[in-house]
Amino acid sequence: MKEQIFVLNNEQKLVELNESTFINENQFQELLENYPKLISGSQINPENPRKWLLISREFGVPDELNGGNKWSLDHLFVDQDGIPTLVEVKRSTDTRIRREVVGQMLDYASNAVTYWSISEIKNIFEKSCETNNIEPEIKLLELLDEPENIEKFWETVDTNLKAGKIRMLFIADKIPKELQRIIEFLNEQMSPAEVLGVEIKQFGNDNLKTIVPRVIGKTSIAQSKKGIRSYNKWDYETFFSELERKSGINSVKIAKKLIEYFEKKVTELWFGEGKKIGSIVPILGIEGVNHFIFTIWTDGKIEIPFQWFKKKKAFSDIESRKQIMKKLNEINGININQNKLDKRPNIAIELLKNKDDFSTFVKVFDWMLNEYKK
């Protein structure tokens, strides 16, 4: 029997929405590709909700080293901790959803951890971004808790894959009881791998559609065995409190002065979610592309991301980045070398305590913002 849900609209009228099925499996897969948030990361880990990076749909799985692909996984995602997440999608009308899909997933997982290479995963992700006219670094920045972690991200994915630290997700519009019991059993027994189901139901009428995800398999036994790490969620108050604890009140005064100056000139102040160290990144968004200019850390450092500057048209040639370096080196105590022009050097925030040095610093980034806008 199909379910119903009800919505109380702005006119205080009750709107009845009836459960409906997906037209076909491809429609279901496209929905997840376009809206990964439907794989409810907050239900999978309420203390540290999962965020998803789609590597590719129809990701090939070989059954021998350097062999051709024998199978095709519906989706390969990676979360912010670099955990490969294998997704198989089935409609409730597909008879394979009961037992056959389990053997299918275990085939994929066992061969993936044995034969997938990180270079192949990275290459396919970059090609997918290129096809969709997206910068890979920007997509990664949306996922990760700190910009500096991008370099380490693929190493973490590789480490997790080799250790079998993966996540297997069975996604369906209705997960039968037989499959639910198997998912719960596997999730309790398997470590470090995680096995979950996500039931995604859609309800609608001629004018409105509501989609409701529900995660299955998170038993108390499985949770206690696997554990969940929690992270700091930095905001204005917690960031400056930690900066004062680690670096002193003078660093706080300088950092606040910088933020007050630049928050009027950028489109966003992005706060990181690092476990031990917090960050603030002023970001200028132009036609859907984000440009971040520097990062302030709670350890009292300011990071200058030349590595990302060179990926932007305004500063893609080294001579333009040398101009940034020369301008910053006019500040007492700063001595950035040319070999850092494709890296992310740090400077101590205390070096900006002098009024003239502070003025020189902000003028450098005022100039950069104008170059981006051109």
Image (tube, rainbow, N blue to C red):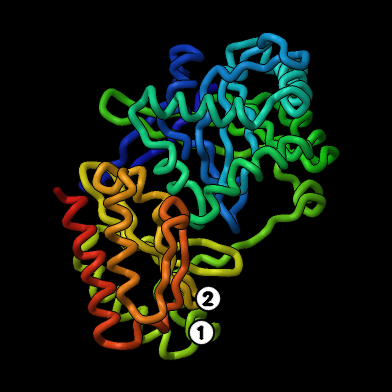
Q: Residues within 10 Å of mark 1 (few under 14, many from 20)?
A: some
Q: Is residue 200 above or below residue 26?
A: below
Label 2 belongs to which residue?
299
Q: Residue at x 68, y 9 (%)?
A: 68
Amino acid type, callout 1: Ser
Residue closer to the observer: 135 or 321: 321
Identity of the residue drawn at 61% across and 48% down: 81
Is residue 316 visible in this depiction of the protein?
A: yes
The answer to which of 168 and 325 lies nearer the viewer is: 325
Which sits earlier in the primary sequence, circle 2 or circle 1? 1
Dot 1: what SS? helix
Q: Are marks 2 and 1 in contact (CB under 8 Å)?
A: yes
Camera-nearest residue between 52 and 88 = 52
Q: Is residue 261 above or below residue 310?
A: below
Give the image quarter of residue 269. bottom left
Question: Measuring 76% from the left and 16% from the top, which residue is drawn there?
Answer: 65
Q: Residue at x 27, y 59 (%)?
A: 323
Image coordinates for residue 80, horizontal then vertical, percent: 56, 47
Which mark, residue 247? 1
Mark 2 surroundings within 10 Å by alpha-carbon count, few (fewer than 14), some (14 through 19), many (20 or more): many
